[in-house]
Amino acid sequence: MSYEEDLARIESIVSELERDDIELDRALALFEEGVERLRSASKALERVEGQVRLLVERSDGSFELADPDR
Amino acid sequence: MTARRVEELDLFGAENDRARPRRSRPRERRKASDDAAARAETAAGADPGTKPESAIAISTLTRIAKDVVEGAFTPLWIRGEVSDFKAHRNGHWYFCLRDESAQLRCVVWSRDRQRIPAAPDDGMQLCALGQLTVYPARGDIQFRVTAMEAAGDGLWRKALELSIAKLKAEGLLDVERKRRIPSFPRRIAVVTSPDGAALHDILAVLRRRCPVVEVVVVPARVQGDGAVDELVAAIERVSRWREADTVIVGRGGGAREDLWAFNDERVARALAACEVPTISAVGHEVDVTLCDMVADLRAPTPSAAAEAAAPVLADLASQLGARATAMRNALQRRAMTARTRLQRESRDLRFAATRGCERRRSRLENTAGRLNALSPLATLARGFAVARDDSGRTLISRTGFAAGMHFRLTLRDGEIGATVDSGGEGTVPDTTIE
């Protein structure tokens, strides 16, 4: 699940939760899912610093990310 | 082929004055095919061309003239107005360059055309780089053009306009084709020169805004020979790889002619075909390149491209925080509504229950009152008594009594046993029990 998908899901959970006619059971289930999504989205923001890599294509057409200083 | 010794006119030996034909020593020459005429002339024994007997063949003269002219002129830039332009089916271009009083036939061989952006139009003022030569088949002086520039970038403009028209006709410039740039990419590919300022700028911006994004450099020359090929190859590589969320293709600012690779149709087509959403970043504020038109997003500079490609990490964090709060608030509100409703329901229930009880009780009391009013006990309270025989039958007439009979009297506050003294005499008023 990508950060964007997580965020979009959280948005829709919030808007459904904000409706007055929602069943309480459903509201609780949605909230639990929302918390899970929040956790996964936050994780995406906490990854280690992204590095600068070089895209190298091997002769067999496969790809490799190389260290640019090498 | 067998080398053959032939006699040859060497009218213009390398060490000699080229302008003056003179007789020369015969010398060895390996090329046999073109010198049959020369042999014949030498055989005549006179200075070539001085007598009818030593007349020179046209092909000889034109060949020599060609050598002379080509030797006399290094490649030059010339200037003039284009006329009689013709693109031949064999790929060569023919036209004249002229000024007020003279004109010169020009040719562009098809193999030389790749360095020229577009065919010139008649009437265009042109500077052409080329070699003055002789075209033996016609005996014409001819200028063999290898590069040309029109006033005001005319040829580049024209080439660009042609390409734009073509791409537009194919729908590659349609707004509907533009894809959304992912707002939170994990990986950004950058197609640019690995040691250019553009890459430096992009990395600096990304590091500042969103250090968690991985940057993958796909090196390509961005100007000069081979730039187009390398840009196309790099873009296609990113497209095949597919692991990037966004690709930035660009270079830092430069002179107009340095940006030309980004106006190349092949680069633009590679960009249009790229599987990954594209951002063009050609650092030239004035000119919009072909790549800018084709890319999903045009950024004016590489730094701007990086800003468009990645969000500010801190913003994302606060965005997430806001969502979390909104969710919590919504749930709390929902729970509160539920609790309020529950309280109201339970109060209603209690109220309804209480009211029901009271109603029943008051009815009961009412009934009890009425019952009480009818009760014989009230009569007893007033001092009357009820007589019953031992079997409990009420004795309401003297005929029920017999002397010595045992019976019971019920009074207001209880019963007593009694015995009849004498039976059935006298008149007692009828006793009525109300």
Image (cartoon, helix red, strand yellow):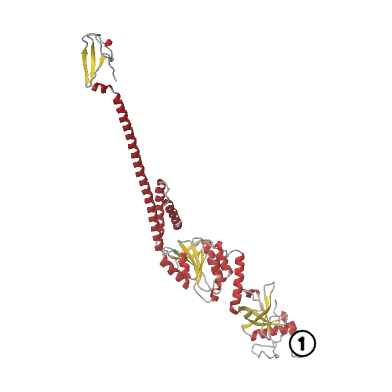
- The location of residue B307, given as percent across then percent down, is 45, 67
Residue sitting at x 71%, y 83%:
B62
Q: Is residue B260 left or right of residue B88?
A: left
Please say if A70 is above or below B394. below
Residue A60 shows in the view: no
Is the C terminus of chain B in the top left, top right, bottom left or bottom right quadrant? top left
Residue B79 shows in the view: yes
Q: Mark 1 points at which residue?
A: B55
Please say if B67 is above or below B249. below
Please say if B406 is above or below B84. above
- How many marks are shown on the rendered structure? 1
Q: Who is closer to the viewer here, B44 or B5?
A: B44
Mark 1 residue type: Ala
Q: Quadrant of residue B173?
A: bottom right
- The location of residue B123, given as percent across then percent down, is 66, 79
Residue sitting at x 29%, y 28%:
B369
Q: Mark 1 lies on which chain?
A: B
